[in-house]
Image (cartoon, rainbow, N blue to C red):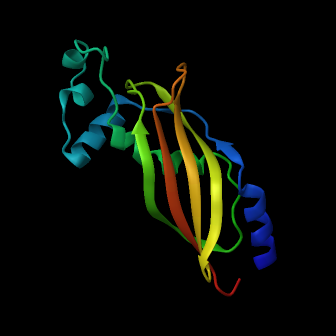
Amino acid sequence: MAEERAQVIARMTGAVYTSGWLAVSQQMVDRFADATGDHQYIHVDPERAAQTPFGGTIAHGFLLLSLLPRLLADAGRPAIPGVVMGINYGTDRVRFVQPVRTESEVRGRFTIADIQEKAPGRYQQVLDAEMQVKGQDKPALIARWIGQFVVDASA
């Protein structure tokens, strides 16, 4: 299985994977506001937010960032043989490029920049992530996302 894993990793490095579209609903934004305590009116008050330059409510930047795992799962990235768990390691160079109005659709575009074995059975994956907004030229956010995954040592 180790040889098969090495071949899959070699094919993945440099590859680009794009998810399907996901609607960012007002309910999703409201639930995120409740979970985080961030009830700023630009996120949760459609009438008041309509008077801002945004023209309506917008998603929290951190909500958008938190959607990256969901979008990656939908992007068709091949399974790496023997993986038993994935762990977030962090993000670098996160930028919220433009706001996302509620009820907009977003998708993730992920480029696998690097995958390296850091210790026996533990790999680090570096992804360049871009969240695109349907009908917009500029992305909503860009980030370098670093994750680790653990493989079954007996595999």
Q: Quadrant of residue 98?
A: top left
Total of numbered circles in the picture? 0
- Percent coordinates x, y for residue 23 in the rendering: 47, 31
Image quadrant in which the N terminus is located = bottom right
Occupied quadrant, residue 103: top left
Identity of the residue drawn at 24% across and 26% down: 42
Q: Outermost residue toward the front?
A: 93
Q: Nearer the viewer, residue 78 or 13?
A: 13
Quadrant of res 94: top left
In the rendered structure, the answer to whether residue 137 lies left or right of residue 103 reads: right
- Of 77 and 142, nearer the camera is 142
152 vs 51: above or below: below
In this rendering, the answer to whether 71 lies above or below 137 is: below
Image position, residue 59 (x, y; %): 34, 32
The answer to which of 71 and 136 lies nearer the viewer is: 136
The residue lying at 55 percent from left, 21 percent from top is 137
Residue 33 appears anywhere in the view? yes
Residue 77 sits above or below residue 51 on the image: below
Q: Position of residue 86 (x, y in %)?
A: 53, 67
Horizontally, residue 63 falls left or right of residue 50, namely: right
Q: Is residue 128 left or right of residue 94?
A: right
The correct choice, above or below, for 54 with respect to 68 in the image is: above
Q: Is residue 1 visible?
A: no
Is residue 61 left or right of 5 when viewed as pictured? left
Residue at 64% x, 52% y: name it: 112
Residue extending furthest bottom? 154
Residue at the (24%, 15%) spot, across then down: 52
Q: Position of residue 123 (x, y in %)?
A: 60, 71
In the image, 15 versus 69, the foreground residue is 15
Q: For the C terminus, which image quadrant? A: bottom right
